[in-house]
Image (cartoon, helix red, strand yellow):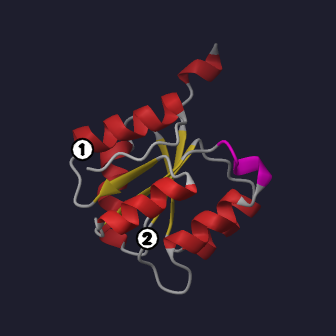
Amino acid sequence: MADKNKKKRILLVDDDKTHLAIAENMLKAEYEINTAGSGQEALEKIYSGLLPNAILLDILMPDMDGWETYNRLKAITLLNDIPVAFFSSVDENSQIALAEKIGAADFITKPFNKADLLNRVKKMLEQRGRAVKKS
């Protein structure tokens, strides 16, 4: 029964510290939050034993963008069933369509509000679905 009361772990990946802090503050009451400032840092945390229940991943990051990070995360067998959503200020239909095509759990457009973000993360965790919803 103790497991039911344990908070689900969310990994937030964004090179913008302000966006990371905003998302963390919105989610920390409901979830255990881990952050990474780059795709490489996210991978290092995973390789060091972090196993999140869901990942929110920015697209526009230097060195390794969100698309490459997503592909590397999904290449890790242990993460195959972990839902990954993109959260980005880029809301072009082509980006949303690509997220849907590769199997992302959601596409959340920044800026987001707390209620919407909490609802989307909750749905990701409940459904572990593959359908992308445009915000």
Which secondary structure dominates the residues rendered in magenta? helix
Label at residue 59: 2
Q: Is residue 65 above or below residue 77?
A: below
**What amino acid is labelled 1 in the image?**
Lys
**What amino acid is labelled 2 in the image?**
Ile
The residue closer to the viewer here, 7 or 79, is 79
Q: Is residue 5 visible?
A: yes
Question: Percent position (x, y) of residue 135?
Answer: 26, 50
Q: CA distance from mark 2 to mark 1?
A: 20 Å
Q: Quadrant of residue 45?
A: bottom right
Q: Earlier in the sequence, mark 2 or mark 1?
A: 2
Residue identified by numbered label 1: 114
**Is residue 85 toward the left or the right of residue 133 in the image?**
right
Residue lying furthest bottom in this view? 63
Residue shown at the point (68%, 48%) measured from the top left: 51
Q: Secondary structure at mark 2?
A: loop
**What are the residue bounds of the magenta stretch?**
77-81
Residue shown at the point (38%, 60%) measured from the top left: 96
Residue shown at the point (21%, 48%) measured from the top left: 113
Q: Secondary structure at mark 1?
A: helix
The residue closer to the viewer here, 66 or 3, is 66
